[in-house]
Amino acid sequence: MRRFTQGFYGYAFAMMVCLVGVGVFLLITPQSRTEHIPRVDFSIDVANMRRDASYQVWTPDPVLANWVPTSSRMTRGKDSEGRATVTWRLGFATAKRAHALLAQSDERPAAGFANRMANSDRPQGSVQVNGVTWEKRFREDKNQRSLVRFLPDATLVVTGTAQWDELSALAATLKQQSKLT
């Protein structure tokens, strides 16, 4: 027994026992080969936004093929001047499995909201999407691209790690919803 606990043989024996243990663990652990991205239904947030927001809400209509809505969050708050605000964030896993987010709010100043969502205050040109001009922003250290649109009563930001073509595709699907009373 002594030769299994000391020297090279002891080391080799211990290594073999560890590898056998790892092999057994891998064999009995359940494994899934299919992708599972949790999907959320954001329709209740859309209805709440249409009722509570002071502005007309923009929603993706339709949701792009192979895109999965992964998060939806509506918040009420106050802006820097104490006015009530309503903000909605809708996150997606894109067809290429990158992240994209639609954020919209009536927060003032609008530039403050846009800067926070884009993690940048520096426009880097613009892009036309369905005849509408969107401001482009890029934050290299976070690999974050953003499209920003300032409206008279709200600010829209489409942002994430998705490439420009996917963010533009999301922006192209946005449709203004009528207000619910």
Image (tube, helix red, strand yellow):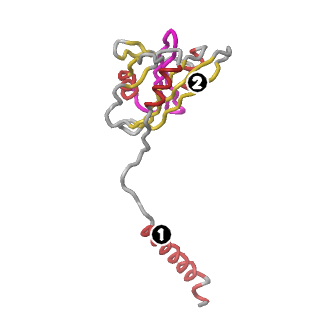
Residue 172 in the image, given as x and y percentages of width and height: 36, 21
Q: Name the residue under label 2.
A: 116
Q: Are circles 1 and 2 on residues that touch, CB within 8 Å?
A: no
Q: Please say whether residue 31 is visible from this viewpoint.
A: yes
Judge the density around disc 1: few (<14), some (14-19), many (≥20) Cα neighbours within 10 Å: few
Q: Residue at x 42, y 41 (%)?
A: 39
Disc 2 secondary structure class: helix
State the separation of the CA atoms marked 1 and 2.
45 Å
Residue 166 sits in quarter: top left
Residue 179 in the image, given as x and y percentages of width and height: 45, 16
74 or 132: nearer the viewer? 74
Q: In this view, does 144 lie above or below 114?
A: below
Q: In this view, does 126 lie above or below 5?
A: above
Q: Residue at x 60, y 14 (%)?
A: 108
Label 1 is placed on what type of residue? Phe
Label 2 is placed on what type of residue? Arg
Q: Residue at x 53, y 19 (%)?
A: 53
Looking at the image, tell me whether mark 1 or mark 2 is earlier in sequence order.
1
Residue that lies at the very extreme toward the left in this rendered image: 65
Judge the density around disc 2: few (<14), some (14-19), many (≥20) Cα neighbours within 10 Å: few
Specify whether 127 is left or right of 117. Answer: left
Q: Which contiguous range is marked in magenta?
A: 135-164
Q: Mark 1 points at which residue?
A: 25
Residue 1 sits in quarter: bottom right
Q: Is residue 38 above or below residue 100?
A: below
Residue 36 in the image, given as x and y percentages of width and height: 40, 48
Residue 76 in the image, given as x and y percentages of width and height: 60, 24
Q: Which residue is drawn at 43% across and 63% down?
A: 30
26 or 136: nearer the viewer? 26
Magenta span dominant secondary structure? strand
Residue 174 sits in quarter: top left
